[in-house]
Image: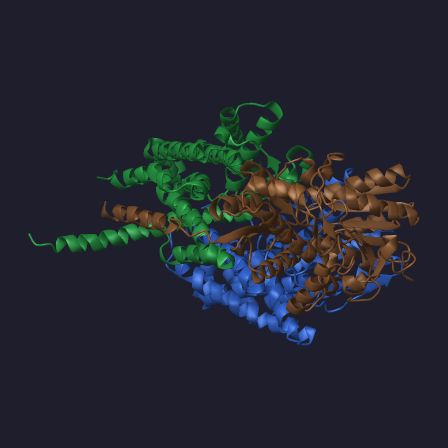
Chain colours: A green, B brown, C blue
């Protein structure tokens, strides 16, 4: 029974292109990019308790790696995307190693600094990266929106399955233990150092993968994708959808991405509305809107069911 | 378990909410791309949109196009290339526009032309000057304004004739800004004039250390080119003046971006704006055409100031697209492109627009080569660009030459 | 001579930076949290001054009038988002405040866009024109801004070390439990501290506005500089923030002209400070004057 809703969602996701073509398909494809980012970030911030502001930068690393390899070496896209993920993972390892003893705001500030340094570097070295002009890259799969969508869906599934698998394993147990009390966990013999690194490497790898995907769907890579505003969007999506639920964060991403288009009528107020939603979530339902909705609806339904005649 | 069903329902609702409605196609939709929010140049974008709107209203007042109403679909590209791509995708696939016009940022335009090319939709560029936009040779792309090479080669020649010896260029890191630096370097160095140049991010707000350095250079810098748009352009002039560097007795300054044309310019730079040079791609009434008079009147009534080059470009853009529709009696992309290339010969607010098929130089392709260019100089505070002294071209000049400030 | 002009400019900007980062440092000192909405506090101050000035208020009055408004707003935010979780000793409060202040920043910035419009606004400076001291040239708007910032810092120091409120704030910063035992209302002090922090940031924004123009995004880059300064100087230390501010201003000014490639030198201007931040966090996380964080 537990698998029903994810199963339903999966069917809906697969069937989506049957009902929505062209533009909305494009929107959904971009939505999947955010879904991968939100779910991987929520693993790091929600499950492991490490709030990093470098996630958008990792996506950027993946995107630029893939873009530059295709442009300068002519390698095929699947390979460059993987290279992007690996490069991001390496940087994740580096940052994880450098911030081993950092907690809370210090970690947040360091990762923020890295993100900005990366963005400034990409912008300044415009001879290599085209800077704020943007680097033009070939589209994947001949530019077919349909195939791009399914590729994204596939990547998203790989992300969720892998991360959920890790969380359900012993590794996951230790990661969550670290979140609750890092010192306590260490006392019990958990090698917090290596597990922290695992968390960083894993989540940044997927962020890098998402970045490469984004590059070859949009056809243009620019420093914009690494701005603090983008990181804020990822944070908003994860918090709104449920920081401690990978699927919740992903759904948060899809919903907010959909709202971005849907609320186009309100254009200017759109992002303020998002901000308000996130603040509301944090104040009144800080496990995330969706988990709270679950629990509330669950309670309601159970009450209704228990009043049914025997 | 039950709470998860709710999630599915929620998801379904979202999906339904996303379902696009179907409208009957009784309008001719023209897309307009412009920067209407930061970090784009908002004033420029708004001027462009205002001009476009006046054109659309005029068309509808006289019966529309092919019997249908003209509807402008405006997309905000914020000066960000990614947004340019996204907005173009939306305009073409979702709004189903017949053509797109506009854009004031070259970097964004370069992203937009790719989408236009992919879908075969005509894109008429209003106010983005980078050579590469037309040099790429996409048949879908046309331009009703100048290109960097076109305007700055003329400006460089003027600088040389006016006797300046050491030109400093500070350009923004956009395709336009870097193009400005390149054209000045190429044209001036060839004439034996010293050029010092460097570029910076468009978002820089403090140029003071750099301006101090330039001020103390030997041989002295006697001409500064402000190759920035937006706040940066204005702040550079303000700071240069505060340092006693430019505009001054020793050093002139040219604001190459179009933000020198708006009231916001005077608000920020104040007295520093007097003696500043600018290079608008059009001035109202020069040359005097029927459309320019009518447009100036409508514009003034609506917005309480004289129209500027960008607004005129916005107007011309929409009208030129309309001409193509009328001439080809169709809204099909290929037909419109053919009409723009071969049939359009229309008197706009700045002259008669006709596009060439020349490919030498590469940027000349689909350009309007006779686009008017001016070098003007402000002589009084809070002056409207239409009242400024015209230094070039000769036939419109109102003063003998550069007016040197006394301090 | 060029060197002294550059130095003078750097010191002037540094004074403004100092005021700007004191708010952040102060909030950390008393509430033990990093306010990621700091940039938006700066932005709000900039707009507040601009609006009051456009109502034709005499400019010094416009500046002074924004102070109580900013303070009350800061207190309001603290009460709304930070007090309840602190009181009920929420698990993982540290992570929560990061998320909530960051989200608040995003919300305020995106709220400013439709309310104020995306334009760059020119707020009237308290003093126009240029100051010339022999060969030295300094812009008038910056110099007056720096002088006012200097005065404001002085007032803050007076507040902290010569008033009961200041004593209470310092007590809560040192040890909240002990402070409450001797009768200091800790919750009230926390709200006041947040209000003061927002006010300091806002006044800095009001002073920056006339120099660099007011727009909804102006806070972001200043906030990043503030983070660098506060980490460099030591979170919670007034001396540290002031010193850190001057160090950053000097590094930025001279870095952007001393590196051989002028384009890169200017392009990386903001990165110098960030690299400094990373190095400090790795080598000496408590900064120059901060206290070492106790891990247990």
B184 lies left or right of C37: right
Residue at the image point whose x is 63% and y is 46% from the top: B124
Residue at the image point whose x is 20% and y is 53% from the top: A301
A243 lies left or right of C285: left
The part of the image, by quadrant, that contains residue A168 is top left
Residue B9 % position (x, y): 29, 48
Residue A204: tell me if it is visible: yes
Residue at the image point whose x is 73% and y is 34% from the top: B359
Residue A227: tell me if it is visible: no
Q: Is residue A260 above or below residue B294?
A: above
Out of B71 and A192, give the one closest to the viewer. B71
C41 lies left or right of A188: right
Residue B239 % position (x, y): 78, 57
Out of C171 and B271, give the one closest to the viewer. B271
Q: Is residue B337 above or below residue B385?
A: above
Residue C112 % position (x, y): 55, 61
Out of B367 and A116, give the one closest to the viewer. B367
Residue B204 % position (x, y): 69, 50
Quadrant housing the N terminus of chain A: top left
Q: Is residue B8 above or below residue B396?
A: above
């Amino acid at each position: 029974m537990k698998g029903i809703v994810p199963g339903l969602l999966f069917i809906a996701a697969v069937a989506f292109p049957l009902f929505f073509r062209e533009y909305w398909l494009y929107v959904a494809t971009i939505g999947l990019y955010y879904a991968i980012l939100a779910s991987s970030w929520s693993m790091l911030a929600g499950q492991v308790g490490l709030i990093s502001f470098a996630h958008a930068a990792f996506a950027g690393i993946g995107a630029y790696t893939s873009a530059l390899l295709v442009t300068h070496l002519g390698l095929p896209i699947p390979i460059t995307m993987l290279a992007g993920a690996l490069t991001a993972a390496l940087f994740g390892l580096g940052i994880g190693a450098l911030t081993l003893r950092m907690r809370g705001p210090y970690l947040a500030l360091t990762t923020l600094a890295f993100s900005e340094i990366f963005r400034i570097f990409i912008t300044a070295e415009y001879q290599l990266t085209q800077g704020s002009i943007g680097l033009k890259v070939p589209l994947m799969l001949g530019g077919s929106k349909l195939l791009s969508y399914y590729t994204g869906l596939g990547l998203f599934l790989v992300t969720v399955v892998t991360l959920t698998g890790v969380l359900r394993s012993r590794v996951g147990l230790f990661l969550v233990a670290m979140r609750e009390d890092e010192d306590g966990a260490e006392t019990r013999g958990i090698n917090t150092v290596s597990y922290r690194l695992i968390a960083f490497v894993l989540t940044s790898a997927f962020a890098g993968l998402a970045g490469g995907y984004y590059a070859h769907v949009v056809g243009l890579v620019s420093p914009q994708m690494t701005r603090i505003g983008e990181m804020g969007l990822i944070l908003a999506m994860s918090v709104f959808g449920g920081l401690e639920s990978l699927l919740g964060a992903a759904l948060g991403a899809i919903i907010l991405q959909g709202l971005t288009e849907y609320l186009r009528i309100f254009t200017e107020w759109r992002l303020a509305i998002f901000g308000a939603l996130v603040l509301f979530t944090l104040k009144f339902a800080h496990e995330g809107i969706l988990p709270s909705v679950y629990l509330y609806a669950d309670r309601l339904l159970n009450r209704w069911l228990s009043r049914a005649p025997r | 378990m039950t709470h998860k069903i709710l999630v599915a329902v929620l998801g379904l609702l979202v999906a339904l909410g996303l379902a696009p409605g179907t409208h009957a196609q009784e309008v001719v939709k023209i897309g307009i791309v412009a920067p209407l929010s930061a970090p784009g140049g908002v004033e420029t974008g708004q001027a462009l949109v205002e001009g476009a709107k006046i054109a659309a209203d005029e068309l509808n007042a006289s019966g529309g196009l092919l019997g249908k109403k003209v509807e402008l679909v405006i997309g905000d590209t914020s000066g960000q290339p990614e947004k340019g791509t996204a907005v173009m995708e939306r305009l073409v696939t979702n709004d189903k526009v017949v053509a797109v016009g506009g854009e004031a940022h070259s970097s964004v335009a370069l992203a937009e032309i790719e989408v236009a090319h992919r879908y075969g939709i005509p894109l008429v560029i209003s106010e983005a000057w980078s050579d590469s936009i037309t040099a790429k040779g996409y048949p879908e792309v046309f331009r009703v304004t100048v290109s960097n090479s076109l305007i700055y080669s003329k400006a460089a020649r003027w600088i040389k004739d006016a006797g300046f010896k050491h030109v400093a260029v500070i350009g923004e890191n956009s395709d336009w800004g870097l193009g400005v630096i390149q054209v000045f370097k190429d044209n001036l160095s060839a004439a034996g004039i010293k050029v010092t140049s460097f570029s910076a991010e468009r978002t820089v707000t403090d140029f003071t250390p750099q301006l101090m350095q330039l001020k103390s250079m030997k041989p002295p810098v006697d001409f500064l080119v402000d190759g920035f748009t937006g706040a940066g352009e204005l702040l550079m002039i303000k700071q240069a003046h505060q340092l006693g560097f430019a505009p001054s007795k020793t050093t002139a300054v040219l604001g190459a971006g179009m933000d020198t044309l708006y009231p916001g310019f005077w608000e920020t730079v104040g007295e520093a704006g007097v003696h500043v040079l600018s290079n608008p791609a059009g001035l109202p009434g020069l040359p005097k055409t029927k459309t320019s008079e009518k447009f100036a009147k409508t514009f003034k009534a609506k917005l309480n100031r004289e129209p500027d080059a960008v607004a005129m470009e916005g107007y011309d853009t929409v009208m030129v697209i309309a001409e193509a529709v009328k001439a080809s009696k169709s809204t099909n992309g290929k037909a419109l492109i053919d009409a723009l290339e071969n049939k359009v010969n229309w008197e706009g607010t700045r002259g008669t627009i006709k596009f060439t098929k020349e490919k030498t130089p590469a940027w000349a392709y689909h350009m309007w080569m006779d686009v008017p260019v001016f070098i003007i100089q402000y002589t009084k505070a809070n002056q409207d660009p239409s009242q400024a002294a015209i230094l070039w071209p000769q036939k419109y000049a109102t003063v003998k030459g550069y007016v040197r400030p006394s301090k | 001579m060029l060197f002294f002009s550059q130095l003078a400019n750097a010191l002037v900007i540094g004074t403004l930076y100092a005021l700007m980062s004191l708010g952040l440092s102060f909030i950390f000192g008393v509430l033990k949290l990093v306010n990621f909405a700091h940039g938006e506090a700066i932005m709000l101050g900039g707009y507040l001054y601009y609006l009051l000035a456009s109502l034709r208020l005499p400019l010094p009055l416009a500046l002074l009038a924004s102070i109580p408004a900013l303070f009350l707003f800061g207190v309001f935010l603290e009460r709304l988002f930070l007090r309840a979780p602190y009181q009920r000793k929420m698990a993982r409060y540290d992570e929560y405040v990061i998320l909530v202040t960051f989200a608040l920043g995003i919300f305020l910035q995106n709220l400013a866009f439709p309310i104020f419009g995306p334009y760059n606004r020119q707020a009237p400076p308290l003093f126009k024109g240029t100051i010339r001291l022999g060969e030295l040239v300094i812009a008038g708007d910056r110099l007056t801004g720096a002088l006012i910032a200097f005065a404001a810092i002085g007032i803050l120091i007076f507040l902290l070390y010569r008033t009961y409120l200041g004593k209470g704030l310092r007590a809560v910063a040192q040890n909240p439990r002990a402070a409450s035992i001797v009768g200091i209302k800790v919750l009230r002090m926390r709200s006041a501290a947040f209000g003061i922090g927002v006010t300091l940031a806002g006044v800095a924004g009001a002073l920056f506005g006339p120099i660099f123009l007011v727009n909804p995004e102006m806070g972001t880059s200043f906030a990043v500089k503030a983070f660098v300064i506060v980490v460099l100087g030591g979170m919670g230390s007034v001396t540290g923030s002031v010193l850190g501010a001057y160090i950053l201003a000097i590094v930025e000014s001279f870095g952007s002209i001393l590196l051989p490639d002028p384009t890169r030198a200017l392009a990386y201007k903001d990165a110098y400070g960030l690299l400094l931040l990373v190095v400090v966090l790795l080598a000496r996380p408590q900064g120059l004057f901060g206290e070492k964080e106790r891990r247990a």
